[in-house]
Amino acid sequence: MTSHILIRSLDRSAMIFLIVVAAIAVAVPILNLAVPQSSALHMPTYLVALFGKYTCYALLALSIDLIWGYCGILSLGHGAFFALGGYAMGMYLMRQIGTRGVYANPILPDFMVFLNWKELPVYWYGFNSFAYAALMVVLVPGTLAFVFGWLAFRSRVTGVYLSIITQALTFALMLGFFRNNFGFGGNNGLTDFKDILGFNVQAAPTRCARA
């Protein structure tokens, strides 16, 4: 019943667009993995990764369109929530490196060893599990959005003032994450990823699955 109402609410052009996007999402990895490299229809691996990156940016743009275009709320802080989810998954990927890092520390990421951290911070606990990391990808930005939205709308902050506050929130988080003593890699961020769910992140099949 719910799906029927959703389909009826979409106009014909929207349905065609969704079908085309779904077809491209299926075709891109198939053209990379199943079509020989000598074929003109072969999709290079770097284009697959590029497609995945643009898809992520499209999701970010869609979220801005929903809150601004449909709700009339101009938020300049979407990058903050997007980044929090990315950092949550990045922390999981860093924990998967283990002894294969430059300093071969089984617990601490390389940047923590370089900065003379003695133990893993509490907020890094649990990120050796993909399920926990996937939960945090949704929970951390969602919790911040709920608290921020509750305080802002409860105080009846609207219009340009809300836009300025969301931009200030993003800038404050950026300054915090860029500090080395926050435990998120500082200016260099989280780098040198190796595996995700046991699969090499640089392997062509893995890159297709991520895209």
Image (spheres, grey):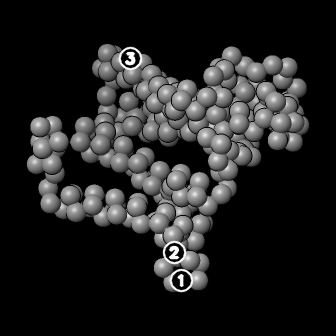
Helix, strand, or loop for circle 3?
helix
**On screen, residue 201 above or below 166:** below
Instruction: Identify which amino acid the numbered label 1 is placed on.
Output: Ser
Residue 29 in percent (x, y) is at: 49, 63
SS for dot 1: loop
The spot of residue 210 in percent (x, y) is 53, 51
In this image, 208 relative to 128: left or right?
left
Instruction: Tell me the CA gap for discs 3 and 2.
Output: 53 Å
Dots 1 and 2: beta carbons under 8 Å?
Answer: yes
Residue at 71% x, 36% y is: 96
Q: Check residue 151 in the rendering and tell me which mark sits there, or answer none.
A: 3
The image quadrant of residue 25 is bottom left
Q: Is residue 96 left or right of residue 104?
A: left
Q: Can residue 114 be seen in this view?
A: yes
Relative vertical location of residue 140 with respect to residue 191 in this rendering, above or below: above
Residue occupying the point 61% across, 40% down: 197
Identified by mark 3, the residue type is: Leu
- Left or right side of 24 for 104: right
Q: Residue type at mark 2?
A: Val
Quarter of the picture holding the N terminus:
top left
Q: Is residue 176 visible?
A: no
Looking at the image, is mark 3 or mark 2 earlier in the sequence? 2
Number of numbered discs on residues: 3
Distance from disc 1 to disc 2, alpha carbons, whole Å, reads 7 Å
Q: Name the residue under label 1.
A: 39
Callout 3: few (<14), some (14-19), or many (20+) C-alpha neighbours within 10 Å? few
- How far is disc 3 from disc 1 in space, using C-alphas? 57 Å
Compare residues 82 and 33 and report the one nearer the observer: 33
Residue 172 spot, x, y in % from top left: 58, 29
In the rendering, at what x and y percent does residue 136 appear?
A: 52, 27
Q: Name the residue under label 2.
A: 35
Is residue 121 rendered to the left or right of residue 45? right
